[in-house]
Image (cartoon, helix red, strand yellow):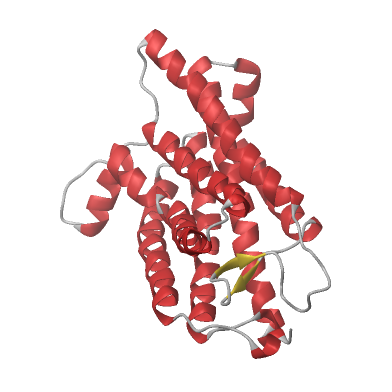
Amino acid sequence: IDWSTRGTSRPVFGAVCIAVCCLGIIPYIICMRIVWEIQKQACYKMMFYLAIVDILTLFGNVLAGVVFIVGGMYCHAPWIFLLISFLVGGGYYASCCTCFMIAVNRLVELFAIRPLHKLFLENRPWFLMLIPTAYALSGIICAPLAFANSETHIFHLDPMISDRYEYKSYFNTLNNFAAPSICSLLYLAMIINVIARKKKLSIQCGVIVIVHMYTCLSYILIPYIINETIFDAVLYTMHINWLIMHGLPPYVYFLFNPSIRRGVLQFANPNLSIHVSTT
């Protein structure tokens, strides 16, 4: 197959992808400003880093939306497709790892694990963010990249240069299963502790982890869907869910975090007298 002659223009789907990404990027940028102002706690420092990698992922998907609109294939512009894959793949892996580290931080705080508590003091969380950065670089350098593909309207491991090779990424499969599963187990332990001790739990982080788990595990199940009609609909749904996963945090913060909500309201109406808490 000469893939340079292939490609399907999907203007509606591409436009929807761009719109969903913009609905995530714009409020995320506003929330970043608020999170930066209240970054005294370790979790806020990590949330700021999470915002950066999520925005990079969404920006990469804006470019992918353009690919879907014009019906682009890897053969048409390899360097642009590589840029998109680096942004989307690196941002995605860094996001998963950061969510795991936020879950660890919440666990350490809730169970008062003193030896680990020292890791999150002062500016140390910024240095800890080298871990998701290294994790993301490992994913995009040592494992096959996924490329935006207008033919399958999703990111595909096969760049479709020829039909001679079969592409697999064990790193991606392991990430999609391990990261959300471990995070969910950590939050389950925290929920049990909260019920037992009647303490408060950070709902915002739990919601974000649940959405990550749902989306990641869905991608693992895709190869087992046989019906072609259902398979096509699932691909559309999974890709949009993936975009929502990266654009959801600012909305979750606004709903469940009083400090960020007050900061956003103050940003929207500077004349409104609201004190933004740093706790």
* Rendered position, 168 above or below 108: below
Q: Residue at x 54, y 63 (%)?
A: 56
Looking at the image, which residue sits at the far front? 227
Residue 215 to residue 110: above or below: below
- Residue 185 is situated, as x and y percent measured from the top left of the image, at 55, 26
Residue at the image point whose x is 52% and y is 68% from the top: 61
Image coordinates of residue 201 in percent, x first then y, are: 39, 25
Left or right placement of residue 170 versus residue 243 in this view: right
- Looking at the image, which residue is at 60% across and 74% down? 149
- Residue 17 visible? The answer is yes
Q: Within the image, what quadrant is residue 166 found in?
A: bottom right
Give the vertical position of 53 relative to 193 (above or below). Answer: below
Q: Please state the horizontal and vertical placement of residue 207, each as a whole percent of the image.
A: 41, 38
Q: Which residue is at the front of the view, 31 or 63?
A: 63
Residue most toward the right?
164
Q: Residue furthest bottom?
A: 5
The N terminus, quarter of image: bottom right
Query: Who's the residue at 69% across and 53% down the image?
Result: 136
Q: Looking at the image, which is closer to me, 121 or 213?
A: 213
The answer, for residue 131, to whether it is visible in the render is no
Q: Is residue 49 left or right of residue 147?
A: left
Compared with 149, 33 (above or below) is above
Q: Position of residue 225 (x, y in %)?
A: 56, 53
- Between residue 83 and residue 134, name the one nearer to us: 83
